[in-house]
Image: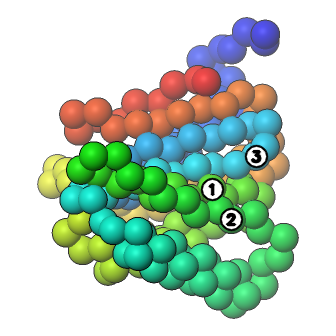
């Protein structure tokens, strides 16, 4: 197993990307980067156990909207998967996307759709201390880091989670 250094570019690009996405979009509960497949997995938590029909409707809305976005942006060959699962009083919505065709615009679209369609069911870790200027900086970092990840996928997987208002990133 290769030894990782703190200042390794592939780690810092990947870690910075996951941190920026989690900071900018408090709706995302967990995010994984799988270097072997070049895939990012975003997991959203939904409170109150939605029924199967509602989850299916949300899933279809996301898939259709992402496909429309890809058509408008002339993106082809994108790998997209949307899964839902339930457990007691929460549900999880997971979106898998290949890094090669993912853009910050698509992430923003997904978040807007989920905010609008799920309203109070979408679990959000709101942080009032973050200024609008900081959010704009995070958006720029996301764009830059996505481009870096497309050029250098890195050799290691990463996982980013929220815990008590903090964002934590670990090597897989």
Image mark count? 3
Give the side of residue 100 with respect to residue 65, left or right. Answer: right
Residue 103 on image: x %, y %: 63, 66
| Label ID, residue 82 | none
Residue 169 on image: x %, y %: 47, 30
Which residue lies under the disc numbered 2?
A: 80
Disc 3 secondary structure class: loop
Which residue lies under the disc numbered 3?
A: 38
Give the side of residue 63 with respect to residue 9, left or right. Answer: left
Relative vertical location of residue 1 with respect to residue 132 in this rendering, above or below:
above
Viewer-proximal residue, 8 or 21? 21
Residue 123 on image: x %, y %: 26, 56
Tag 1 or tag 2, which sits nearer the N-term?
Answer: 2
Residue 121 on image: x %, y %: 24, 65
Residue at screen point 63% across, 41% down: 33
Instruction: Judge depth for marks 2 and 3 and give the one in front.
Output: 2
Which residue lies under the disc numbered 1?
A: 96
How far, Cα to Cα, is label 1 from label 3? 10 Å
Mark 2 crowd level (few <14, some 14–19, many ≥20, 10 Å Cα):
some
Give the side of residue 157 with respect to residue 21, left or right. Answer: right
């Amino acid at each position: 197993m290769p030894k990782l250094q703190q200042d390794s570019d592939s780690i810092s690009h990947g870690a910075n990307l996951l941190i920026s996405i989690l900071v900018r979009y408090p709706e995302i509960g967990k995010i994984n980067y799988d270097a072997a497949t070049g895939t990012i997995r975003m997991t959203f938590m939904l409170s109150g156990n939605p029924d199967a029909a509602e989850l299916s409707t949300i899933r279809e809305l996301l898939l259709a909207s992402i496909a429309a976005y890809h058509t408008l942006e002339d993106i082809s060959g994108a790998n997209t998967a949307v899964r839902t699962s339930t457990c007691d009083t929460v549900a999880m919505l997971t979106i898998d996307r290949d890094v090669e065709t993912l853009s910050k615009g698509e992430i923003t679209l997904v978040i807007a759709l989920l905010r609008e369609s799920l309203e109070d069911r979408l679990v959000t870790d709101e942080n009032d201390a973050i200024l609008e200027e900081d959010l704009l900086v995070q958006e720029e970092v996301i764009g830059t880091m996505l481009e870096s990840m497309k050029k250098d996928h890195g050799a290691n997987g990463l996982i980013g989670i929220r815990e008590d208002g903090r964002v934590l990133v670990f090597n897989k």
